[in-house]
Image (cartoon, helix red, strand yellow):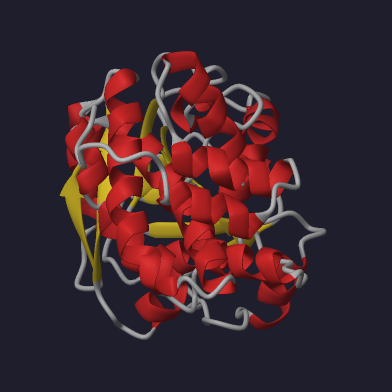
Amino acid sequence: MKITVIGCGRWGSLITWYLSSRKGHDLTLYGRATSPHMKRFLAERRNDLLTLPDSVKLSTSLADCLTPDCETVIISVGAQGLRALMEELTAFDLSGKTFVLCMKGIEASTGKRLTRVAEEYLPDTAKVAVWVGPGHVQEFYAGIPNCMVIDSEDEDTKKSLVEAFSGDIIRFYYGTDLIGSEIGAAAKNVVGIAAGMLDGVGLTTLKGALMSRGTREIARLISAMGGSELSAYGLCHLGDYEATVFSKFSHNRAFGEAFIKGESFTELAEGYATVRALVLLGRTYGVDLPICQAVYRILYEGSNPKEELNDLFGRALKTEFYL
């Protein structure tokens, strides 16, 4: 399979490295010529975490990457930058290609799922899938395995990708609910920020309650949007909590803690923008999202973190599994 990976950051480069070990793949990693990540790859074929094998081609030209024989385009860029990238890609013939979105986010300004954003710019013959689930670059590169999910509305696309991408380090499962896979994967980053906030105010012991209530909250939203609430309990959301809520490698958790402590944080934390989209979706579908709303007020309205978190876990008594 001839594959182009767009995005040379930590996840895009890990995907390239991982797939290069699978037989039968022809890999090209694309990055902008101005990207410091790509500049280093071109000079050293490595970043701070991994080294790419010589078999991987490196390119700063989309024209050279999106050739007619390129079958699969894997996109790993910031979720809020997807629309601009898709607009750029319309200059090329995208017919018959499969696009795999590896970002976990929702378009903040519209509340649209990323597959819906991509489809606005793709011909009918193109297919779209998502690659979601737990795992950190540092652990995969060290040979520590994990389980992930590939989902698509097209069954043949889903099956071919799972067969082509599965290996010893990543075991893929077939997703059965694209709405749930996308919303669940994006929302876990917001729960990760909330977890970091709890760490920042010394309430780490409440992470168990956060995970339980967070999963139920997102399950209600997924159901209201037409998906299966069971998806929230799968790998896209609850199954990704260990990597997001506890791991030292979690950018979202680290961002939440740094925010509470008034410290700077320069890495991408997708949950920061995603919480805007979730609050919008909650209003649109009439779903109560207390955790998302509390995180939003802290991040965007200057609300007092300790008061918000105390209020969140001191809400009026009700049945645990209220609808």
> Residue extending furthest front?
317
Decide if residue 9 is on the left or right side of residue 21: right
Q: Quick one: 246 or 180, which is closer to the camera?
A: 246
Q: Is residue 294 above or below residue 90?
A: below
User: Residue at coordinates 51% horizontally, 66% vertically from top-left?
Assistant: 198
Q: Is residue 144 above or below residue 27?
A: below
Say how many tags the image has. 0
* Picture quadrant where residue 223 is located: top left
User: Residue at coordinates 42% horizontally, 64% vertically from top-left?
Assistant: 244
Q: Quick one: 12 or 269, which is closer to the camera?
A: 269
Q: Is residue 45 above or below residue 237?
A: below
User: Residue at coordinates 66% horizontally, 49% vertically from top-left?
Assistant: 298
User: Residue 201 location, x and y as percent?
Assistant: 58, 71
Decide if residue 217 is on the left or right side of residue 46: left
User: Residue 241 location, x and y as percent?
Assistant: 34, 61
Can residue 288 be seen here? yes
Q: Quick one: 75 or 279, which is closer to the camera?
A: 279
Q: Quadrant of the C terminus?
A: top left
Decide if residue 250 is on the left or right side of residue 60: left
User: Residue 227 location, x and y as percent?
Assistant: 26, 24
Q: Is residue 90 above or below residue 62?
A: above
Can residue 70 be seen here? no
User: Residue at coordinates 62% horizontally, 28% vertically from top-left?
Assistant: 92
> Residue extending furthest right?
34
User: Residue 73 location, x and y as percent?
Assistant: 47, 42
Decide if residue 282 is on the left or right side of residue 47: left
